[in-house]
Image (spheres, helix red, strand yellow):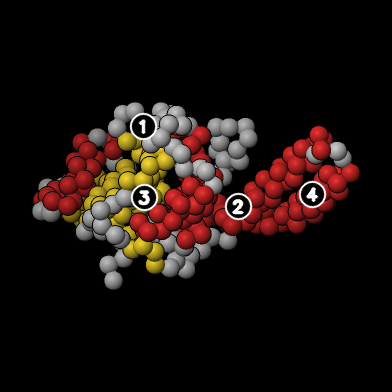
Amino acid sequence: RMLGLKERALPTLLHSRAELAPLTEAFDRAVGEASAREQRVRWLRKGLHHDVFMQCRLTQAVGEEAVVVFLRDARRMEAQVQEAKLASMGRLVAGIAHDIRNPLSAISQAAELLSEQMGPQAARLPSMIATNVARINETVEDVLLLGRRQRAEAPLLDLNSWVEEWLQEQHALSRAGALILIPARTDVAVHFHPDHLRRILNNLYDNALRYCSGRKGSVRLTTRVTGAQVELAVGNDGPPIDEALRAQLFEPFMSGESRGTGLGLYLCRELCAQNGAQLDYRLAGSLHGEFVITMAIDRA
């Protein structure tokens, strides 16, 4: 927080360092436009992106105009809001999870008995029951996982090697026909729980497959180094997500499909946060978009 700096002094301070250019531009807008007195600003420092929430207040100090500037960590503010949501959600689901699982278990057992008594042609009906029971149970598990949010014990991974292993898994499952991998030229190590990263990547890849042309190379998996960070991006050749939907893209229970729960992307972002990473959606040119996981590189 910076207090008591006169309107003429603060621009001088901001302009003194090139890395503060985004803050300088935001300050200039705030002084000139009342609507810009509160804004979110992203700036790069020592190779890392920082998101801050800037608030400017014009006041009088010793008979002269002065500016009071408040800078708050935007991601920390958002994390506090999300933690409050998750705590409430966790209490709710923990209270009803037992009541949900008991009938699910009974339905699943009944479906197994039914499949043994029915002929082959009708066996698909118990199978459909079992599949949907599994989906409901997975949703309960996802929400319980979110309610227990805490920083993961993340081991050190060689990112390129891990992604290659994940790609081999997709080939073994005959799921890699549309996928091409564009690895970073430099091997980098990151701290990330491998089970979490696998779950995130599976979800993002499923989404990319759903909205791509299906041709070879229609889904791109890219790792790229940007300063002290590395990005793992999943993109496809489908149209970008509508701008109106992007603001709510990572909100829980927001889904554009009747068969979706709306927890997939939200869970992905929360798992990233547990590992000290960030998940965003970006435009890749004017025709396509991509989901990007940003992780700090371990230099030790």
Judged from the image, the secondary structure of the residue bearing numbered disc 3 is strand
Residue 211 in sight: yes
- Name the amino acid, label 4: Ser
x, y percentage for residue 116? 86, 46
x, y percentage for residue 229? 29, 56
Which of the labelled discs sits on residue 108, or is there none?
4
Which of the labelled discs sits on residue 105, or is there none?
none
First in sequence: mark 3 or mark 1?
3
Q: Which residue corresponds to the image point at 34% horizontal and 35% vertical from the top-left?
A: 283
Q: CA distance from mark 4 to mark 2?
A: 19 Å
Q: CA distance from mark 1 to mark 2?
A: 29 Å
First in sequence: mark 1 or mark 4?
4
Q: Residues within 10 Å of mark 1 (few under 14, many from 20)?
A: some
- Name the amino acid, label 1: His
Which of the labelled discs sits on residue 142, or is there none?
2
Disc number lying in front (4 or 2):
4
Residue that carries the numbered disc 1 in the rendered image? 288
Instruction: Tell me where residue 264 sits by quadrant.
Output: top right
- For the residues labelled 1 and 2, say whether their Cβ atoms are less than 8 Å apart: no
Q: Which residue corresponds to the image point at 28% horizontal and 71% vertical from the top-left?
A: 300
Q: Nearer the viewer, residue 215 or 86?
A: 215
Q: Residues within 10 Å of mark 2 (few under 14, many from 20)?
A: some
Q: Nearer the viewer, residue 217 or 210?
A: 217
Quarter of the figure that contains the N terminus: bottom left
Residue 81 in sight: no
Which of the labelled discs sits on residue 232, or is there none?
3
- Name the amino acid, label 3: Leu
